[in-house]
Amino acid sequence: MIKTEGLVKRFDEDTLISYNNIVFEDGKSYVLLGASGCGKSTLLNMLAGVITPSEGAIYFDGVEMSRKSQKQKDRFRIEKIGYIFQDFKLIEEMTVEDNINVLRLEGVKTSAMDDVLGKLGILSKKKKKVKQLSGGERQRVAIARAFVKAPDIILADEPTGNLNYEIGKKVVEEMLKIAKGKTLVAVTHDDRLAPLFDCTIDMNGIASSYSESEVEKNA
């Protein structure tokens, strides 16, 4: 179980995002909805340990990870979390296979590659360079890379942001099938995809972004 308590992220001396407490239960899929700038991706990056909360805490199965050293958070992410980046973070001149095998540099086994690529319908693209793939195929490669290490937690930042609705829906359906039994938290701006997930969290009611100087001015 993932639990947040009193999370606040400051971006400068004046601007911050404050979050209500959230609980993500094991084995469920969650989608975070909300307008651009409401703090969806910031929350995801704090869960991943990519950025550190300014205040508050994040617990994974009762262990507070948010105040661990960056080295400890990075190791936890490598071992336990599959992160699907909004901009894919693929190396275009390398093949699909080589992009996934980059995980070996972190000590991650990639023996499940063929199985995961097969489930996502892109095993035939394994030897292709990323630059030769369509947007939907690239997105599937990014998803495959996150799932190959069989993580307990999947974090997906706008996994369909570069795709049209029909292709995006198919990609999300494939992702959810592979993620069955795992904890998945996805960010999207497309509320049409929300029914595919177990739970929907409206970030407009969870997070508040404001300028402290404006609050003082209006007090």
Image (spheres, rainbow, N blue to C red):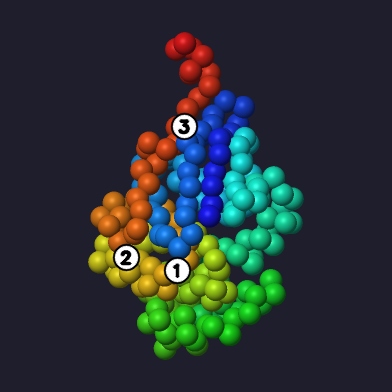
**Residue drawn at the location 74% of the way across and 56% of the way down:** 71
- Estimate the x, y position of residue 95 in percent, counting from the top left: 53, 81
As drawn, is 135 to the left or to the right of 13?
Answer: left
Q: Which residue is mark 3?
A: 209
Q: Give the CA separation, mark 2 to mark 3.
A: 29 Å
- Which residue carries the number 2 mark? 168
Measured Cα–Cα span from mark 1 to mark 3: 33 Å
Q: Which residue is mark 1?
A: 181
Q: Within 10 Å of the Cα at label 1, are there few (<14), some (14-19), or many (20+) other Cα atoms?
A: some
Calculate the distance from the C-alpha at mark 2 to the C-alpha at mark 1.
Answer: 22 Å
- Which element type, helix, strand or loop, lies under badge 1? loop
Q: Where is residue 176 shown, x and y percent of the image?
A: 38, 68
Rendered residue at 53%/55% (across/down):
1
- Whether label 2 touches label 1, CB < 8 Å: no
Q: Amino acid at mark 1?
A: Gly
Query: Can residue 129 be seen in this snapshot?
Result: no
| Vertical order, 56 against 178 (above or below) | above
Q: How many marks?
A: 3
Work out whether mark 2 precedes mark 1 in sequence or the reverse, and give the earlier one: 2
User: Does 108 sit above or below residue 22?
Assistant: below
Which numbered dot is residue 83?
Answer: none
The residue that appears at 54% across and 31% down in the rendered structure is: 16
What amino acid does circle 3 point to? Ser
Q: Secondary structure at mark 3?
A: strand
In the foreground, 177 or 54: 177
N-term mark: 2 or 3: 2
Along the viewing direction, whichever of 21 and 50 lies nearer the viewer: 21
- Tag 2: amino acid: Gly
